[in-house]
Image: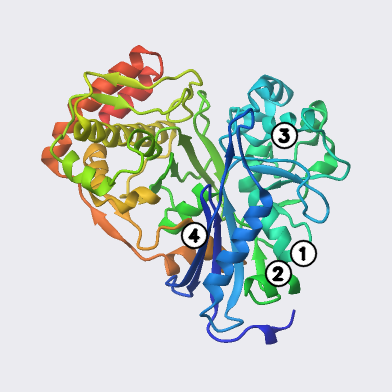
Amino acid sequence: MGSENFTGDPAWAGMDIGTQGVRVTVVDGRGTPLATGSAPLDSLRGEGRGHEQNPEDWWRAAVAACRQATAGLAPGRIRALAVCSTSGTIVLADAAARPVSPALMYDDDRGRPYVERVTAAGRELWDDLSVRIQASWALPKLLWLAENGGLPTGARLLHSADFVTARLAGELTATDSSHALKSGYDSLGERWPLEVMSRLGLPSDLFGPVVRPGSPIGEVGAEAAALTGLPEGCEIVAGMTDGCAGQIAAGALTPGSGVSVLGTTLVLKGVSEKLLRDPNGAVYSHRHPDGGWLPGGASNVGAGVLASVFPGRDLAALDEAAARYEPARAVIYPLTARGERFPFYRPDAEQVVVGEIGPEAEHYAALLQGVAYGERLGVAALALLGAPVSEPLALVGGATRSRYWCQLRADVLGMPVQIPRYPEASVGMAVLAASSGRSLDETAREMVPRGERIDPRPDRVARFEQSFRLLVDALVERDYLTTELAAKAVAS
């Protein structure tokens, strides 16, 4: 497309396809948000369905969110767009990007019966990549799709971001190496390991081209432009998973930096110049778009436990009441379901409670503290493998709305934390879109302003230490933690 479609000061758009909705943010060259749009998504659960969404809903929500975000902007300002989505969410689609299978979400575990088969088929590669195949990863779920409905001729494996970029471009686009990781992509060799896929009975044409995040993969077509308000010819840039998007929004892209994305679950990520190898399989690494690696892990603890135990409650009021219990008498590792992925990998793990759970406000306080204890264990796990966080830990995700919880997390960690001024994953994708053809780190330095720093309160650090050690001892007793990780955690 010619330059005549673009007018005014350049702007950049980012889209986040989340579990509960799609969000679009448009920023200027300094990273300041100019406009946002959002639209809700619904999930289908239960009755043997696991966790599914309708891919057509992704597109409908993307169109609605884009129209909101572009409504007040001068036409043609947006130069490029990047899209992130949940890691491990997949769908099969035909050449016209029409779904030909259910969309299995990131936490759908119907791949569990296929984990051993996938592990055996690519054991040497998985060892080289230092990954442990998990039931919720895309590749085992792909085998479930193959055996429960089959693989239609010509079908292509798409991640949810791919589905939307294909609709924007009017044709199938390349995926990015970040989304492709849990689908079995070889991020060292930067290729699909088709010999492994052949052993699993998966045809090679199921897997499309893969590029590094930040690479151009297409342009917004005329039909999509009319629907979304994006300018025709707007460049589509390969995105990353939502956890990586949060890391970009935090500007945590150099060794020593780290980000904690706390929403329904907890994702912790650091930066390393070399690929880290975790013999326990809890930590895996995405490729850094500039080179190097982004190691991290996703826990099953998180803010979701609050909605589970206190549905529909005024959490701000509970925050105020929880401040009276520092620490709570009960120490909890607050899993809401069986199994944990990070900072330790134990599919059989159960919630751990040490002591007696008190009345409502104290129970709530124990849950807040328990998530923070898990976060501290995660920081220790990264440090143990070679990615220590020496700078203030960036906090992003919905939990940053609770100023009290952010302070509590700093106290439990015993280190400063920082809340980015614009922490949304969609902002991270806008920064990635702006980085196309240049260094992501340099772009982030220009577009990600420093946020609020919260220092730990020395008296609270001491108060929480004993409770944290009680939890560590309980996790070691159950063989959930290795002695090495336990020692690192209490020494940090």
Identify the residue at horizontal 43%, vertical 65% (top origin).
Answer: 445
Mark 1 closeness class: few <14, some 14–19, many ≥20 residues within 10 Å: some
Three-letter code, disc 2: Ala
Query: In the displayed image of the protein, which residue is found farthest to the left?
Result: 459
Q: Is residue 165 left or right of residue 93?
A: left
Q: Secondary structure at mark 2?
A: helix
User: What colour scheme governs how the chains and residues are painted in the rendered image of this protein?
Assistant: rainbow
Quarter assignment of residue 262: top left
Q: Distance from label 3 to label 2 (Cα)?
A: 29 Å
The relative height of residue 293 versus residue 481 in the rendered view (above or below) is below
Residue under label 2, please give it.
224
Q: Where the N terminus falls, by quadrant? A: bottom right
Mark 2 or mark 4, which has the lower sequence index? 2
Residue under label 3, please give it.
142
Q: Is residue 246 left or right of residue 60?
A: left
The relative height of residue 322 versus residue 122 in the rendered view (above or below) is below
Mark 1 or mark 4, which has the lower sequence index? 1
